[in-house]
Amino acid sequence: MDVNKVKIKALPSDDFKDNETLQAYIDELNATGTNVVVGKLDQMINWGRANSLWPLAFATSCCGIEFMAAAAAHYDLARFGMEVVRNSPRQADLMVVAGTIVHKMGPLLRRVYDQMAEPKYVVAMGACAISGGPFVNSYHVINGADKIIPVDVYIPGCPPRPESLFYGLLQLQRKVKVEKFFGNKRIVRPYNPDTLINPKTGETVKVENEFNK
Amino acid sequence: MSNIQDIILNAVPEALIEEKQKLTVTVEPKQLHPLVKALYENKDLPFDYLISLIGMDWEDKLGVIYLFSSSKDMSQEIAVITATEDRENPLLYSITDMYEAAHLNEREVYAMLGIRFINNPDMRRFLLDGDWNGYPLCKDYDADPTLNPITIANKEITDLAPRIMEDENGNLVESVANIFDEDDYIINIGPQHPSTHGVMHFRTALNGEVVKKIDVNSGYIHRGIEKMCETMTYPQILHLTDRLDYLSAGMNRHALCMCIEKAAEIEVPMRAEYIRVIMDELNRISSHLLAWAAHCNDLGATTAFVYGVREREHVLDIFDKTCGGRLIINQNVVGGVMFDIYPDFQKDVKAFIPYMREKLVEYDDFFSHNPIALNRMVNVGNMSREDAITYAVTGPAGRGSGFSCDVRIHKPYSLYEKVEFKEVIRTEGDSYARYMNRLDEIEQSLHIIEQLIDDIPEGEILAKVKPIIRLPEGQYYQSVEAGKGEFAVFIESKGDKFPYRVKFRSPSLAAVSVMPLICKDELLTDFIGIGGSMDYVIPDIDR
């Protein structure tokens, strides 16, 4: 499937700066072929899901205020069917990690993520949630939410403007639109912790991943 | 001042008194408590307001700098220094019996430097987890990440508070006390809760629907900014202050800039001063508007939230056009401002003033007299003037309790001596007083802008500043009135291009520390509304 066939209402494909990543994702999903019969059903389900993504604002700092501004008057997140900000993870499809994640917050972020029902998505909003941002050298900051949970879309900025947030959320809508509901072929991205504590034994485990090899 | 020196020498004859930027008194740990008591009980000028409690590591000594001021005359300030040479088991005396504000501050010093305070009833670590290895603000802190690995394992919260008490014979007795009673029904409010205004964690013991006790647990956004500052040059630190209380970003940065300018003796051009003050006041308006909007939202009025943010966007548009930032405006730099105002700046601001006034009337019409809202604000969350002072609650919340604490009036800086405005004070001390204070302060801010906007002088916007700024050896202190209260910066320099120690006074920390007191015996539903009326920003507390 070609990336230009993935259509969302808000923005035509040509206007997206990054189409390559999504194309690679589509190719990966369709590597073993496409089912003609359930493919249509998939499209229908994805149409519904992409247009009613309910966010959970995991707002820890400044980015949370920009998220609030995006959801309120003037910017109006409701245009994309995302205005129903849930405060319970059990009712949300999409977690917006808005702000720095620190050591003390790490276990809680994971717990809130685990409480969300599938299918679930994560958007890392702002430099801190991507990599630690301005606080990358600090002793108490986790360098990116993807050390704890898998992230679907990264939105740079410190804090990102509401327009950038929308761009990221629209990218996510496209990502949702190409998914395969039947056959359960959503690709789960691995998250990349350096060291973790085994919850059962309490021992420190060194984890090897593509970043610290 | 000589009178104060007599009082000090009367209490502690060995005290070393120096006239630095502030009157500075150095005493031995044993003499600290008698000295502070004498200052506290001074009849004419009681030093009853603890501005800041700064933990220090001077390498040979571990110590604390206390900054006191008086509620009678805020311009009177005094710094008290004490230190111990024992690095293995540092012990100092607590002042929590006089200043309630010292509780959380002393716990923070323990977490950051390992200093324990004798007679503090609760010596758990604040901000950091109880099992954190090392004390980050010590100069010999080992930052090896394997010592404190990232974990996704849930941690048990223990409600046991260790303490060291001194008995009648002067012996130190270590013991452990339980924070809650055994059969208390405890619920966790936060850290991921929309009404805690960030990631605050309140452990709340309930008696039916009534709040019995609250234990404040913070640190879920502790980024170690003060430690990071020690490895950064002064211009590099500037952007970190914006991210403390991001709603008062410009004002925080103003404080740090003034602190550095004072120390390095840099004269700021007049045009820059005008731009700074106008931007500060616009920033205050946007901060109060969001506080109002969020408070109404906490009380269930989503419409009010949308209205507040709508007006706030007008201010942000002006910021956007001036310097490209919306929330975090990178406007102030050492020696002036980074960007000049744009050609239509004055026109836009002048159009905004009548628009905002009109909207303030609208707010009053549709929410301020709503009977349901009044029910949830009037006579709820009462804080007396004495409580506000001992908990060091400043800003609109402190002034709602009759504590005259506006830094712009008592310790005027920049252009605030030239402009005329009223300090908004109410004496009711309830949620409604704090709510109304914010709306009235928006009007005062508009009034200040009105006086300045037409007289912005021509000229430079940036003084000549050396590329590498080195502050002369010494201790520097500067406070400003931020959106939430008195925000202050303390810098200790050893003459290097990096500061030796930087400490930020957080107005929100005081606002949170008083929550257990003012929420006691209130309904759980009102707890949320009281939190909204105090208007704290958590990243400012955690730093």
Image: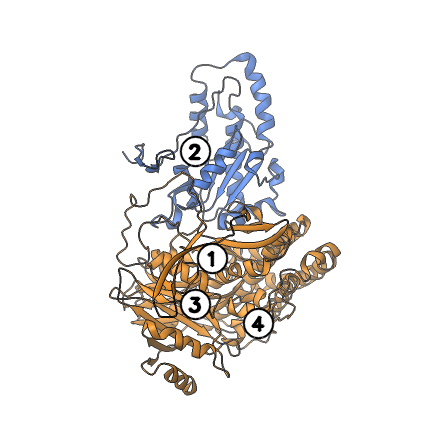
Q: Which residue is mark 4?
A: B403
Secondary structure of residue under mark 4: loop
Residue type for callout 1: Asp
Residue type for callout 3: Ser
Which one is closest to the eye, mark 4 or mark 2?
A: 4
Q: Position of residue A48 (x, y in %)?
A: 61, 27
The answer to whether residue B9 of the structure is visible from this angle is yes
Mark 4 Cα within 10 Å, few/some/many (few <14, many 20+)? many
Residue type for callout 2: Pro
Relative horizontal placement of residue B287, taking residue B228 as reference (left or right): right
Numbered label attached to residue A150: 2
> Do the residues marked 3 and 1 share a common chain?
yes
How far separated are the C-alphas under marks 3 and 1?
14 Å
- Residue at 62%, 47% (x, y): give it: A74
**Chain hosting mark 1:** B
Q: Which tint was used for chain B? A: orange
Q: Which residue is mark 3?
A: B52
**Chain hosting mark 4:** B
Numbered label attached to residue B264: none
How far separated are the C-alphas under marks 4 and 1?
22 Å
Which one is closest to the eye, mark 3 or mark 1?
A: 3
Which one is closest to the eye, mark 4 or mark 1?
A: 4
Q: Which residue is mark 1?
A: B540
Mark 3 Cα within 10 Å, few/some/many (few <14, many 20+)? many
How far separated are the C-alphas under marks 2 and 1?
29 Å
Q: Which tint was used for chain A? A: blue
In-front residue for pair B136/A23: B136
In-front residue for pair A84/A155: A84
- Tell me the quarter of the picture where residue B254 sits: bottom left
Residue reaching furthest to the left: B60
> Do the residues marked 2 and 3 share a common chain?
no
Q: Position of residue B188 (x, y in %)?
A: 53, 46
